[in-house]
Image (tube, coloured by chain):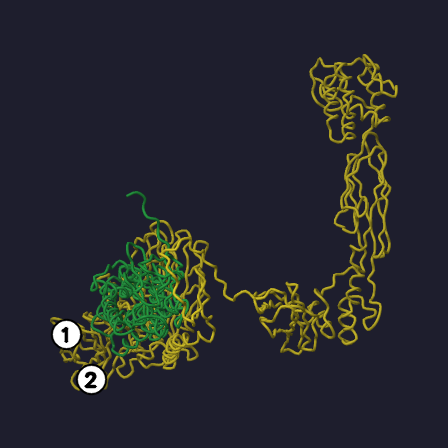
Chain colours: A green, B yellow
Amino acid sequence: MSFKLFIYYCALCGGWAAFLAWIVVQLTGLQHLKSTLATAALTGALLGAFLAAAIGYVDALQNAPVGLQRVLRVGVCAGVGLFGGMVGGFVGDLLSAFLPLFIGWMITGAAIGASLGVFDILQARREGQEVRLSLRKTINGVYGGLLGGFVGGVLFWMMMKLHILPLSTLAFALVILGIAIGLLIGLAQVVLKEAWILVESGRRAGRQIILTREETVIGRAESCDIGLFGETGVEREHARILLEERRYLIQDENTPAGTFVNEVRVTRPTPLRAGDAIRIGSCVLRFGEREKSAPPRGT
Amino acid sequence: MAQTCAKCSRLNPPEALYCFYDGMVLVDRVSPGPATAQTATFLQPFIFPSGRTCRTFDELALACQSDWNEARRLLHEDAFASFFGALGRADLALSAREAARFPDHDRGLDQFLADLPTRVLDEPKLRCNLQDVNLGELDNTRARTLDLHLENQGMRLLYGTISAEDCPWLTLGDPPGAARKLFQFGHETTIPVHIRPEKLRASNKPFAGKLLIESNGGTWTVQVRAQLPIKPYPEGVLAGALSPRQIAEKAKASPREAAILFENGAVAAWYKSNGWTYPVSGPAASGLGAVQQFFEALGLTPPPKVQISERALSLKGNAGESLRSVIEVRSEEKRPVYAHAVSNQPWLEVSRAKLNGRVASIAVAVPAIPNRPGETLTAKLTVQANGNQRFLVPVTLQVEAGVGDPPLLSIPEPEPLPVPVAAPVPVAPMPASVSSPPSGARQRPARRRSRSDLWPHLLPAGALLLCLLAVFSFELWRGGPSALERGLDGELRVKPQFDDQMRFGLVMLRERDPHNPNDYKRLTYSASGEFNNTIIRIDEYEYQFGDRANTRVWIERKKDLSGERGAESTMEFVPEKVQVTQHVEIVRGPTGNLDTCLIYYTVKNHSEKKRQVGVRILLDTYIGANDGVPFTIPGEKGFVTTMREFDAKQVPPYIEAIEKPNDADDPGTVVRLTLKGVSVPHLPLEEVQRVLICRSPRLPRVKWQWNVQPMGTKKEAERDSCVAVYWDYLEMNPGDERHLGITYGLSDVGLGEGEAGTRLALSVPNNVEPNSEFDVIAYVWGAREGQPVQLELPEGLQFAPGEKASKAVEEKATRTKVSWRVKTGAEGTFHLKATSGPARAKPTRLLVQARSIFG
């Protein structure tokens, strides 16, 4: 999946998730609870869980290995989204008399955005790795969610002012809110990414993966972060991209076919620069890195 | 005694011999005889180079006049200035120097001569040989010239201008001439006047022009007259036509024969021969299209509406190939269509349109596709058809890449890496199936994404849109707003009507006025609201909303909001920069039907100052033919029949009135003015601060306060009621907004079956918040004093502390009421029942609902 498709599917899944949340709200009668606060909190929770799960799934497809981990990721996202949506709905409704309505949406959006990075943080902690990149991903998600909540909230508010066909207006408004949150979370992840890999040739040419962990494994095993399934000359765990002292290094896993950077065989951890071509078996990957700010002068 | 100069009339000192300003001899001081300045002999004579000797001013002036060129040269060389300086006439020396500096030397000499103290030179005087010229009939193919002789009948220099006023067909001077010309001469001159008949438009009336000559020797006017008769059309079916209208008449009689004359330009040439502008712009059409073109240009027939077959053209081919396409302009109307097209690119050629009745075909061709493989060229085709209808057709030409062409996707090559980042080791042999990419070079992606690849990604988006449309359609099908929720129809039961000032009245669409069956039954005294008004009080001033003046202007008046359901109008109070928006719209009321008018105002302070703003709505209430119905106030005993005022704490949730309160069998229409709990999605409405029930002032422009009177006598027929609703006069900061609203519309009392003369009906609020208290009213007809009335509450509702389910009627009356304070719990819909002996009220629906941020 390219970054453009990733953003597109984040938005689309956001819209679908919001639509499903609307259906559940209508079927369960959540809008007719005893108090508006409860209605707002539960509706927010439902919306947050659905949205976070949907966007988390797209993120897992893009950046996570196949298998159980994807399910776990989606589950963690849904949990964080549920909690964040509940808080957002509750606080938003509580403050609606004093503050603009979209405050609640922004809180919900921020929680959904944060949910994308929570699993990475937990995984890094478990594996004893640094959490800097995972934290960065979480923060990027929060930025996107806040902005998406704001934009979607304003659109939601404008639509609800139309006073036409209440049911479908609410459905349209929620879908627009979901699309806005999904779109901007996806956009924030892509725009604010630090380092990434583009598969230039091979069976999955065109796929783009954001590097969000200290150690990214490349190979044909399902557990690999960058899976090169079915490629000739690729070992189960072929190479690793390591983040050390803010530098990305590539390390070959002593494979017979070897790993090449710009057609030079890698024999030890080798620094990567933006634009470097990594050849693993029949696949060529292109390493991309955001321009780093100059290090401070002096000691 | 001061002396006055005889020439310039200026004053000079008593002892002066000569005028200080012009050198003239001051007569009073000079003894009689010849010893005057002009005749007085110079101490030394002025001798011209020719040998002419001048001993006096007179001689000098005459010598300059007769030997003008020599005098001009001497003046320019300061000879006169030196001479007069030596004579001790500093004034004349100065005058000579100033004259010498004059840009035009002739004018300088003339100026100098005018300053000399002499009378021998006469003033210049203009004369012209012509005064009135009749040129007779002109031929507009031949220019003519007229000579104007100007003569100076005086002396010195004559100068001025000659102009042809407002007649462009006369020009002056050398060909082609100008409308204005300067002249100067000593004795005489000739100025050619050109008659330019091509500037004349043939007419049966004579032309007149005027030449105006203005000079220092006087003004002269020359009248010039001429005629340019219309040339009749010389030949063919149009022969003898003397005007465009006659041409049109003859062309209408023989359109096919005339068409040839229009098409070949003969008519255009005839226009030109008469000096007229041909009305058809652009190339002439062919066939009957040419006649249609002429008729349209004259405005004798409207152009048909035409359509173009191609809004855009997309061409594709290899370099050097030729391409052709055809664009058609056609009309549904039975009139000839003509068109022509122009291309803005040399590689795109357009042919003359082929006209065939209602279709004009324009061939577009690329004779040779430019040799720019891989590029997409663009051009614009401007097609102009009947009545100057224009179409802009974008044309794209995709030049296909041949063998060996540059790659389709051009990606900038990255810089080669200067230093290897890892220790180089011998490169392992590449697998046979893998081609080795060059070092540092970026490969092209395996394939480009085609459009067909995108469709699978668009499907889920399309499915989502379809789902939303399905929900929308379903809700619409079920009958409009809230239909899904309530299963009700979308028919309007009441309708607001507005006057010019956007004051509004309310009528019932399903019932007729008891006094006039042709009209709808009214719910306000005036059907169009003339006796209702809204006062906006800003700082020290009171304004009536909708009363337009210089200080208050309409920003927007949008009627027919959501069909005929209402109107929104915004007025700005200019000096205070406060904008007030009145929103009137029919919404669903307590009956669940579209029978209630929501009225709300948004006040916004756009100024940079704090403003004190208050709003008062006056409703002249009325039901059918009853102007003085008693009002029911929830929680209060009895009915309001005279006057009542409520402050902020006392404002009831609603006020209700019944058209025929004493008729238990047919109480008629029930109206309700809701004052609390009115909600507009996402607009925080302020609480009403004061309510006044009284006699209607019946003055359309009544102010914030007026002389309030009770509703009237005890007789209902003589009563006259109104309700005024106030929102406080509050300070608004710059940018602040206030939202104020009420509803007014129909209600329903659950009138049940009665026995033994007793009837019961229940009245409850429209919508109650969860965990709040409200009043339930039971109207009782034909009850005796002390008769018990029982209210049955469903589960989820309970009586407020101190309330009992059973209450006794406190007075004997045709109609009375009993009320209870009830407390709500959770949200939901509840049905309330009341009984009194065998009499029962119809179960009444109560909606307990709150709104969250999720709508």
Residue A120 vs A31, above or below: the answer is above
State the image quarter where residue B161 is shown. top right
Q: Which residue is mark 1?
A: B799
Query: Is B772 on the left-hand or right-hand side of B626?
Result: left
Q: Is residue B772 left or right of residue B393?
A: left
Q: Which element carries disc 2, helix, strand or loop? A: strand
- Give the number of the mark in front: 2 or 1: 1
Q: Position of residue B122 (x, y in %)?
A: 83, 28
Chain ID, mark 2: B
Name above or below for residue A265 compared with residue B108. Answer: below
**How would you rate the neighbour count of disc 2 (Cα within 10 Å): few for under 14, some for 14-19, many for 20 or more?**
many
Q: Quadrant of residue B438?
A: bottom left
Comparing B227 with B14, the one in front is B227
Contact, mark 2 vs mark 1 (Cβ under 8 Å): no
> How many C-alpha atoms fall within 10 Å of the one at disc 1: few (<14), some, or many (≥20)?
some
Q: Which residue position holds label 2?
A: B840
Marks 2 and 1, how far apart in space? 20 Å
Q: Position of residue B832 (x, y in %)?
A: 20, 80
Residue farthest front in this picture:
B426
Amino acid at dot 1: Phe
Q: Residue at x 27, y 81 (%)?
A: B663
State the mark number for residue B126.
Answer: none
Helix, strand or loop status at disc 1: strand
Is residue B400 in view? no
Q: Chain of mark 1?
A: B
Q: Residue at x 50, y 63 (%)?
A: B410
Most extreme residue toward the right is: B51
Image quarter of the C terminus of chain A:
top left
- Quadrant housing the N terminus of chain A: bottom left
The residue nearer to you, when weighing B445 against B360, is B445
Q: Is residue B181 left or right of residue B301?
A: right
